């Protein structure tokens, strides 16, 4: 049995939504494995701050302000990444509106624009970026695309959240079947509630809505997992980084849950 060298040193990765949260954790994880990383997000200032933290690993880091809701912006960003890093091997799609964790509107109250915005940002944003990157991966005969979706794909109770995440899973399978013969694996990762820099604020807001305390709200999310707590962004990133590596060749087209083991349902 070979040691688990992930073989990422010198690979070139583009991470969308890379200025914070799981996207930034993935960027740091890839950099720690020796990959050069391009970070893409809308907020240029936040992006540059994030890029500085990734540069600490001693790899090349490119900060690319862009909006995945705009195809021209995406294509220009990918061209810049290829020019500055000399190519691209890995795409991690994480640019999406964060899940609120609160009560979602039901059928009577939900508005078209809510669903439209989620699909425009997450589903079509991921599609645009994959469409721009795929020709480079196919031309070199190797690549990885990992789409960050979410466990709302497996639960009801949030129409917009479920629809957008199921759609990302469907996109992933279609890309995997099309690109697989060219050496490109495509997978989708479903995080659950994840501990990131925005978690304290989210717990405080939910506590206010529920007439509870942040500690009680957090305890409820912790109890919902088999491991007894919310996974951290870094722990979710560990899963993603493996899927970005040559060692993940046996996994393509499928969904990998990274929510700490949601209790109850069996998925097979």
Image (cartoon, rainbow, N blue to C red):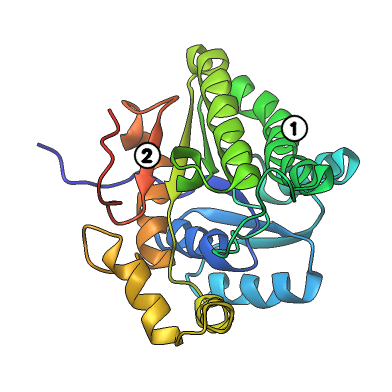
Q: Is residue 64 visible?
A: yes
Query: Which disc, if any, is residue 63?
Result: none
59 in relation to 16, above or below: below
Residue at the extreme front of the image, as rendered: 108
Q: Quadrant of the N terminus?
A: top left
**Which label is found at residue 256?**
2
Residue 232: x percent and y percent? 38, 68
Count of numbered circles on the image: 2
Residue at horizontal 62 percent and vertical 56 percent from the top? 104
SS for tag 2?
strand
Which numbered disc, 2 or 1, marks the residue closer to the eye?
2
The one nearer the camera, 233 or 75, is 233
- Residue at point 85% right, 44% down? 76
Residue 242 visible in image: no
Circles 2 and 1 in contact, beta carbons < 8 Å: no
Can you tell which quarter of the image residue 52 is in? bottom right
Determine whether the residue tagged by mark 1 lies in a helix, strand or loop: helix
Give left or right: position of 268 versus 91: left
What residue sits right under mark 1 in the picture? 132
Disc 1 crowd, CA 10 A, few/some/many (<14, 14-19, 20+)? some
Name the residue nearer the viewer: 67 or 245: 67
> Is 175 placed above or below 230 here?
above
């Amino acid at each position: 049995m070979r040691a688990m060298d992930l073989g990422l040193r010198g690979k070139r990765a583009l991470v969308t939504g890379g200025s914070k949260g799981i996207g930034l954790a993935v960027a740091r994880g890839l950099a720690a494995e020796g990959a050069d990383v391009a970070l893409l997000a809308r907020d240029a200032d936040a992006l540059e701050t994030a890029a500085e933290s990734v540069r600490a690993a001693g790899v090349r880091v490119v900060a690319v302000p862009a909006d995945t809701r705009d195809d021209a912006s995406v294509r220009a960003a990918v061209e810049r990444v290829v020019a500055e890093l000399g190519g691209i091997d890995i795409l991690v799609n994480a640019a999406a509106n964060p899940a609120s964790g609160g009560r979602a509107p039901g059928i009577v109250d939900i508005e078209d624009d809510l669903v439209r915005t989620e699909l425009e940002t997450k589903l079509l944003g991921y599609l645009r970026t994959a469409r721009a990157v795929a020709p480079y991966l196919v031309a070199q005969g190797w690549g990885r695309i990992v789409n960050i979706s979410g466990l709302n794909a497996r639960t009801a109770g949030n129409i917009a959240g479920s629809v957008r995440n199921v759609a990302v899973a469907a996109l992933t399978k279609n890309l995997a079947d099309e690109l697989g013969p060219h050496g490109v694996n495509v997978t989708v990762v479903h995080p659950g509630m994840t501990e990131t820099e925005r978690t304290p604020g989210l717990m405080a807001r939910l506590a206010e809505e529920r007439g509870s305390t942040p500690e009680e709200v957090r305890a409820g999310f912790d109890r919902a997992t088999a491991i007894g707590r919310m996974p951290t962004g870094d722990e979710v990133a560990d899963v993603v980084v493996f899927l970005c590596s040559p060692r993940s060749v046996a996994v393509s087209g499928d969904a990998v849950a990274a929510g700490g083991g949601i209790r109850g349902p069996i998925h097979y």
